[in-house]
Amino acid sequence: MINRIVVGAHYGLKDWLAQRATAVIMAFYSVFIAVVFLVLQPADFEAWRSIFANGPIKFFTFLFALSLYYHAWIGIRDLWMDYVKPVSARLTLHVLTILALVGYTAWTAAILWRL
Amino acid sequence: MSEMRIRKRPKYLDFFSIVFSIQLPLPGKLSILHRLSGVGIFLVLAPLLWLFQASVTSPESFECFALLAAHPLAKLLFAGLIWAFLHHFCAGIRFLFLDLDMGVDLAAARRSTMIVFVVSLTLTVLICWRALL
């Protein structure tokens, strides 16, 4: 019988590519939002809030957040696969990481679409 | 052959031996700092989201955010976070170039490592000076 471990390594080409694609999205957004801050120089609450209330910026901010959470999932999963050997502990940590990141995704959407 | 079988090779290097007991070359230090900075950012995601929420929700919550962010301890944490982000950003771009087979020979890899450290640390100082002081 082949010993299959659900939290073991797989080929991971898709993950490898996703890690890079999300990195590129985040890099572009970081430069973009830094330029927005430098140009607008938000000094008070209303100026600060209106940046993220703007439709396209809201969309790109959410895209950045999604990229961040997917990127974090691959990175943190690699961390558990590198340093946590017992399968049960690793599976628990995987599930907790996914729960946290899915929670952050919903939380981010709630923050942005209440603006 | 038999000698090779007897000799135990350290196949699995745990995290602490990588950080504390093995003298890594500079690109190795960049790499482990890339991982550490990533973990650091992951660990503060929840407080960051909470702070962001406070900063955009209402004028009152913004005041609360501003008061918290003005605390010296918060500024120290922000400085650490700014460094972690910039190191992860710059080292990540270097890794993207390595993935494209650019700068993979030893001299170029060492040079780009130096560039990552110089750029990320300079930007850290500049941004901390501009945003936190």
Image (tube, coloured by chain):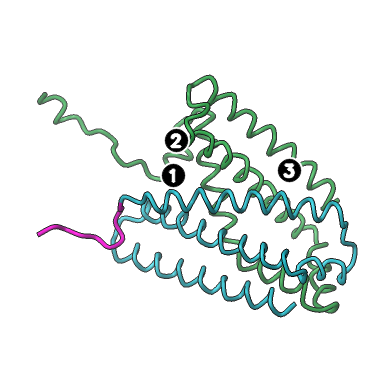
Q: Please, is residue A1 above or below residue A31 in the view?
A: below
Circles 1 and 3 in contact, beta carbons < 8 Å: no
- Identify the mark nearer the N-term, 2 or 1: 1
Q: In what element is the residue under mark 3?
A: helix
| Side of B101 relative to B126 (left or right) | left
**Residue B49 at x, y = what percent?**
66, 68
- Tell me the residue at 62%/60% (across/down): A64
What separation in Å lies between label 2 and label 1 (alpha carbons)? Answer: 7 Å
- Does the segment drawn in magenta span residue A45? no
Q: Dot 1 corresponds to which residue? A: B16
Write down the colour of chain B: green
Same subunit: marks 3 and 2: yes
- Identify the mark nearer the N-term, 1 or 3: 1
Circles 2 and 1 in contact, beta carbons < 8 Å: yes
The majority secondary structure of the magenta stretch comes to loop
Q: Which residues are magenta?
A: A1-10
Same subunit: marks 1 and 3: yes
Q: Please, is residue B120 above or below residue A67 in the view?
A: above
Q: Report the disc number at residue B21.
A: 2
**Residue B73 at x, y = what percent?**
75, 58
Q: Dot 3 corresponds to which residue? A: B124
